[in-house]
Image (cartoon, rainbow, N blue to C red):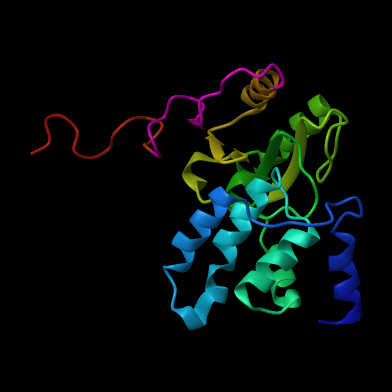
Amino acid sequence: MNTHAAETMEKKFVQDAPNSFEFNNENLKKVKTVLARYPKDRKASAIMPLFDLAQRQCGGWLPEVAIEYVAEYLGMPHIRAYEVASFYTMYNTTPVGKYHIQVCGTTPCMLSGSDDIVRVCEDQLGINLGETTDDGLFTLSEVECLGVCVNAPMIQVNDEYYTDLNPDIMSQLIKKLTNNQEVEPESQIGRKGSAPLTGPTTLTKGNS
């Protein structure tokens, strides 16, 4: 890794982070379950699920101490752990809000209006991509393909997907989250899975 890349990576980690980290008892039990899936000489393969456990324990983000703890737990160099943490958007190397809105910006979503979804979020929340509201309620990010292209545009909020969006639906979704109201995940227009918008086209009634 060149010097510029290392400096860029370092800037992604906040200074006011916790001074120490270790898995709590509940997560240690989960760690043992995860490690049992891999050969003993391939423990490093468990880094991604262990990062997920650490991130959840830290309230939605991975401070440096957690990254290095996981690396040492798995017996791997710190830099390899940093490379994983900084590559995948599923890991947050800075604190995020209670609701982390991740807007898919890949081609199908972009062509279906993801820019409009971002604009609604920025206007309504008063923040730009990569920022968090002053009250710590929302963080707004753009991510790569979330894998539900037929239902574009879509977003992910924490662990849930919200699909078949438009600006009005997105605005209402933000209002409900702001008021701590429950929002049903998946299609926001009542579509079942990725069924055609016009209804079934095969195996319809009367087909032989």
Q: Is residue 62 above or below residue 129?
A: below
| Residue 1 in view (yes/no) | yes
| Residue 146 in view (yes/no) | no
Q: What's the residue at 41%, 32% (across, down)?
A: 197
Q: Is residue 126 above or below residue 17?
A: above
Q: Is residue 170 magenta?
A: no
Quarter that holds the N terminus: bottom right
**Outermost residue toward the left in this view:** 208
What kind of secondary structure does the magenta stretch mostly adopt?
loop
Q: Is residue 97 left or right of residue 168?
A: right
Q: Where residue 125 sits in the image (x, y, percent)?
A: 81, 28
For the record, the magenta segment spans: 178-194
Q: What's the residue at 44%, 73% (across, down)?
A: 38
Residue 178, quarter of picture: top right
- Depth check: 73 or 204 in front? 73
Residue 124, quarter of picture: top right
Q: What's the residue at 73%, 59% (across, down)?
A: 66
Q: Where residue 169 sits in the image (x, y, percent)?
A: 62, 23
Q: Is residue 19 left or right of residue 116?
A: right
**Outermost residue toward the front in this view:** 25
Q: Is residue 55 left or right of residue 133?
A: left
Q: What's the residue at 37%, 32% (across, down)?
A: 192
Q: Is residue 75 above or below residue 193?
A: below
